[in-house]
Amino acid sequence: MESVRKYLSLVFIFVIFQPTLFAIDSDAMKEGKKAFSKKAYGEAIKKFTKHADSHPQDGEAYMYLGYIYEYKKDYPKSIQNFRRAADLDLDKDQRKTVLLKLALFFNYHQDWNLSATYSSRYLKYDPKNEEVQKIYNRAVGNKGNPSSTHTYSHPTKVESKPSEPKQTEVKKDNSKKPEEVSESTETTKPSESYEQLLANQPHLEDVRWDYVLSLFDEKKYDKAEANLKILIEKNPSRSRYHYKLGIVKLRQDDPKSAIESFERAKKNPFSKDTNVFLYYVYLNEGFAFQKLAEVDKAETSFQQAYKQLQKDPPLLALARLYEQKSDWENCISSADKALSLNPNQVESHMFRFVCMFEAGKRTKKFDTSFAKYSEFIDSKFPDLTQTPEKYQVGFIKLARRYTETNAFDKAETYFSVLEKDPARAESREFLFYRGRNYFYSGKVDSAISILQKVTGSSSGHYLLARCYSKKGDLAKTKEQFKLAADIKPEYWASESLEKDFKEVWKDTSFREFISTKAGTVSAQVKP
């Protein structure tokens, strides 16, 4: 055991002083590390606890707390914190060290269930480690027959919690759908590696669970479902089994069955960090309701998810929902809150930009979100046709914005992508604003061709009248102007008429047409 402690001390030194790629360096974390390096453990505990309270998914603070209590020889608290760290966000080296400590600890105390669990998790990162493989084999062989001759305070067992996936390269994200919120970011061994073990010992519940996770990673959802049902039959109150079955059903495009599984998961949630578990249940339940077009229930589920944990994904989901409902104010509010938690979340910027555009709110926030969204698209997708569909929600607004800023060619690139979708290409918004872009870029014939498809729009008829004015076609100018004014009479008295129709304004018949409202009133006699 002494050699193990020395080995772990060396590993600890390496991990602690390696730069942490995914660390969240809050002020409390920085101060905690400084106090830790000075061995001011009392102060370090306060700072790391403060960081953990405000960053509930970050495991680094709990890892440090585990080391502190280990130095203080308070092993129950040390193990409790290492276990919490193992179920939260850590970088790979930190997670390996923590899992190794836990595997060795429970092996030493002959707690075979936990020894098997943590050694198995460690082997997912380092499958060639022969010593840990021996620990795992020994634990599996003795599971169900605990023979501990040592006493220690057993921390409350926590089921592995779902964890939010970290942002990855966008190209990896292209195939993902909004509802794909997985419960594990850890890698697993190939499913075949579990099949022989289960064939010989089908009663090994933890091994079957790892098998399910591996099948899930390999997108073998039918097999994952079958094995989850075996686990549920054996342990029907295990909430994580029902939750995972719900996720599998979502992937199988069966949202109704997914909701049934999520409801069962909620009946017996984790006894520790219940809010974290329920956060993911409600979040995915919201996606399932959204698939069923049950918008009100989806909204309630997303709100419940946010109530459990104040994180940005449910706020983003709400922003998406409100945008689809054309509820611009609530969309803006949800996107605002999401950005206060995650300032660089591109989709939140996209929805805020779109909904502020619709609401006519051209504030600094509008400009900021336009810049973030457009720069992201420009940098990641030079070929717009390769843009994932979820980022195309704001394309029509980007095109309109580029028209407003006289970037006509840039606008046209977006219109060209949008026209490939028949539903979008036939919408009045697309037709009018593409015609508008053609008009202001001097392509009058193209503008006429597309604006003629716009029906029942006063703005469309008015712009078409301006097109014919530029071509000097007085008859069609009058025809289209009257159609516009029949819908919106204010056009007859518009102060911009002389500017908008300067090509035909010099013609007395056009001015008379305007003053008599196409002959429906007497001409006004100027004093």
Image (cartoon, rainbow, N blue to C red):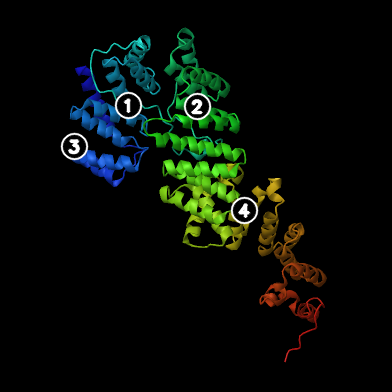
* Label located before the other in sequence (1 or 4): 1
* Residue at far top of view: 200
* Label located before the other in sequence (2 or 3): 3
Indicate which disc residue 396 carries: 4
Name the residue beneath numbered marker 1: 156
Badge 3: how crowded within 10 Å, few (<14), some, or many (20+)?
A: some
- Asked whether the beta carbons under mark 2 and mark 3 sit within 8 Å of each other, the answer is no
Image location of residue 107, percent across then percent down? 29, 16
**Tag count:** 4
Tell me the CA gap for discs 2 and 4.
Answer: 41 Å
Quadrant assignment for the C terminus: bottom right
Answer yes or no: is residue 446 visible.
yes
> Please, what secondary structure does the residue beneath circle 1 have?
loop
> Please, what secondary structure does the residue beneath circle 3 have?
helix
Name the residue beneath numbered marker 2: 242
Name the residue beneath numbered marker 3: 41
Tell me the CA gap for discs 3 and 4.
Answer: 56 Å
